[in-house]
Image (cartoon, rainbow, N blue to C red):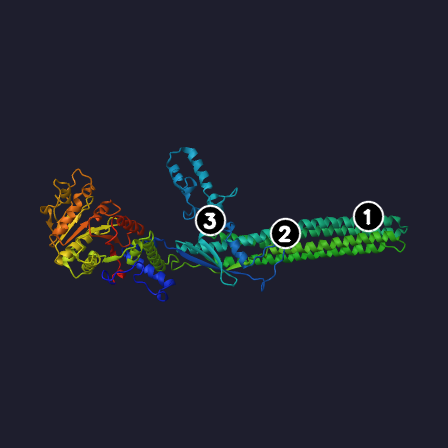
Amino acid sequence: MVIGVQKRQPREINRIPEGQRPKGNLEIMGKVLGAVRRQFRLVALLSVLLCVLAVGLVMILPPQFTATTLLAVDSTEGRPAEPAVTGYSLNVDGEVEVMQSMKVAQQVVKRLNLTADPRFVDKASSSSPAPSGVSDYLTSLLPTGGSSAAQAGESLATASLSPEETVAEGEDPAVVRAAVALQKIMNVRRRGLTNVLALDITIDDPKDAARLANGYADTYITEQISSKLAAAGHTEAALSRRVAELGEELRRSETQIKAFALVQGAQSNDDAARSAIDRLQADVAAASREAGSYASKLREADTLLAAGNFAVLGKLLNNPEISLLDEQRGSLEQRVQRPAEGETDLAGSQQRLDLAKSQLRSLGAKAVETLRKQVDASSNQVSALRQELKQIVQKPDSSTDNSVQLFRLQQEAATTRQLYQDYLGRLKAAAQQRSTVTPSVYVVAEAGIPPNKSFPPRSLLIVVGFLAGIGIAVSVGYARDNYPQTVKFVDELEASSGIANLGVIPDSKRSKTKGLQPENLICARPQSDYSEAIRRLRVSLQLTFNRGAGFKSLLVTSTQRQEGRTTIALSLARDAARAGLKVALVDCDLRNPSLHAKTGISNDAGICEMLLSTPAGLKMSLLQRDPQSSCFVIPSGELGNASPDQPLQTPQLGQLVKDLEERFDLVIIDAASLETAADALMIAQHVDGVLLIARATQARPVRVRDGVVDLQRTRTANLATGLNFAANSDLR
């Protein structure tokens, strides 16, 4: 970009034709890259810090191990149908939900004694819970005494439970806490669309992970069997009550038929028929008592067989073989459970015990089946006797009403008998089911000790942390570069000021200048980018302001502090001196003078003495030579008791500037920034031109605009801007 000779119009700098202007993602990417380039130090430092923090966090994460137990859910196809009396049948998704329930988790905690593990239950929290906030922490610091402190700790332990940890009446809070902790490290998932469930346990110890996974599966299967047995027991109890009710109803029906037969027999004149009726009634009563006795004995035998109480079953059935075999089983169980000292062959004893149990079940089942046949035979005998009684009672001369009533009683008895037999069969099925209940899930692969940790995936987390850190750093750099809005480019500066920009000064890093300050590059490295930019700025000022000879004095100021105006003023003076001009550099920043420090001269006397002394005027003896060039420097001097703006308000200021213009080819005045004081506005009316310095990425457009407006109230011509610390894109 050519600066100075070719004057640029505001907002037209580096303008790209509308059809060639990048749009969309490319434009956004260009803005982001530009912000990163301008805020490179911040982005780089923040990226390094965030990446180091991410690595540190990943490295301190405790390792976790995951053990998996595989369970299979029995499908309804391909397995024996269970009697539909328990109402306990779940699909695969239902099994997952039940397995994750709080009830199962509590049973696992009790079975594996997890309340003794501090990883699941914080023992200290039961008496003194950890403070959950500032108020709780301060409360914990207060002294409390004896039993009241214990009571308060206990109430807080219950109150601090989360909603899912709410303790029901009669439950142990420690068990509930451990169950909630167990649910957090347990996960049950279905493998695709199969009937296989994967039960995962993730914890910091691989052995504990395998133990918990297998223990959880075993506990769930045990709980499922218990639930089925409980459901079967409830069903059996309900069926037993219904059988008893039907039996009582059947007895009432038989009694009514018997009473009707007695009445009919009493009305008969046939002595032989009456005698036959009496005999049959006596036989029916005896057979009914015998059938009832057998039926009661059968119910008791079924109960004993289902419970495995073979000793009482043998006495009930008067079967010495069952009693003897049960004694042998008890002896074998005692030998297996409490082996004699030195006895090692327990496998043989266990085999004999299993054989004895099998024989007991088989022998008991046969004996009960024999009793059941006797019950059936007694029932058949009662039915035959009643049929014979029915035939005798129904004589040809019976009235139609009596026949209808007898038929009704018989039908009611038959219906009740049918219901009785039906419910008796269902009761038998329920009793058999209690001894053959099987779970609907079973373990197909127990969890082994996991050889590798499942968390954290350190390589992945470090990569993600690096990317996240760089992303956050870039975002912060972009936000700082754009919010609040600052001037970064020449076109933005010209658009904000409304006047031409005559110079673009690069950001001279010390790393690129071997430790030299920018103002020292003019003499030490005249071919540097900074020196060339200062030279172009000086030439542009001479060609623009009053066309050469009329330009004798220049005021250098800025919109705000720390924008480099003093450095540029000194650099312009040294460059003009190297070009052969006789230059005077005046430090009029009376509030914060710095020219004497940058040049290494004394600040004992200067412009303040010239303007405040009597008589006031130019004193050549107070001018000092710049050690690195031929220009003369007038430092600020000592104010004494005067205010900073008092010397600049004297009428002698304009005459002093004219005297300097007569003795020197170029007079450069360094004044305070516009936001600091009005000194620059007082000086601007006495000079030929004003250079307003704005620092890229720091100068605010509003302040630039306000500064130009203030200067234009003092002068309307020879006003220009210079962009300091500019990006490389404005140096092309």
Seen from this angle, which residue lies furthest left?
Answer: 621
The amino acid at mark 2 is: Thr
Classify mark 1: residues with Cα within 10 Å, few (<14), some (14-19) or many (20+).
few
- For the point 52% across and 43% down, which residue is it? 168
Classify mark 3: residues with Cα within 10 Å, few (<14), some (14-19) or many (20+).
many
Task: Tell me: 623 left or right of 9.
Answer: left
| Secondary structure beneath label 2 | helix
Residue at label 2?
235
Residue at label 3?
180
Q: Which of marks 1 and 3 is nearer the N terminus?
A: 3
The residues bearing labels 2 and 1 have C-alpha atoms spaced at a distance of 36 Å
In this rendering, which labeled residue sits more in front, label 1 or label 3? 3
Task: Tell me: 11 left or right of 198.
Answer: left
Q: Where is residue 544 in the image (x, y as percent from the top left)?
A: 22, 58
The amino acid at mark 1 is: Ala
Compared to 2, does 636 lie above or below? Answer: above
Q: Earlier in the sequence, mark 2 or mark 1?
A: 2
Compared to 142, does 727 lie above or below? Answer: below
* Towards the viewer: 274 or 73: 73
The amino acid at mark 3 is: Val
* Towards the viewer: 380 or 624: 624
Dots 1 and 3: beta carbons under 8 Å? no
In this rendering, which labeled residue sits more in front, label 2 or label 3? 3
| Secondary structure beneath label 3 | helix
In this rendering, which labeled residue sits more in front, label 2 or label 1? 2
| Secondary structure beneath label 1 | helix
Q: Where is residue 686 in the image (x, y as percent from the top left)?
A: 20, 48
- For the point 33% across and 53% down, which residue is it? 485
Residue at label 1?
259
Q: Position of residue 386 (x, y in %)?
A: 79, 54
Classify mark 2: residues with Cα within 10 Å, few (<14), some (14-19) or many (20+).
some
Q: Where is residue 282 in the image (x, y as percent from the top left)?
A: 80, 50
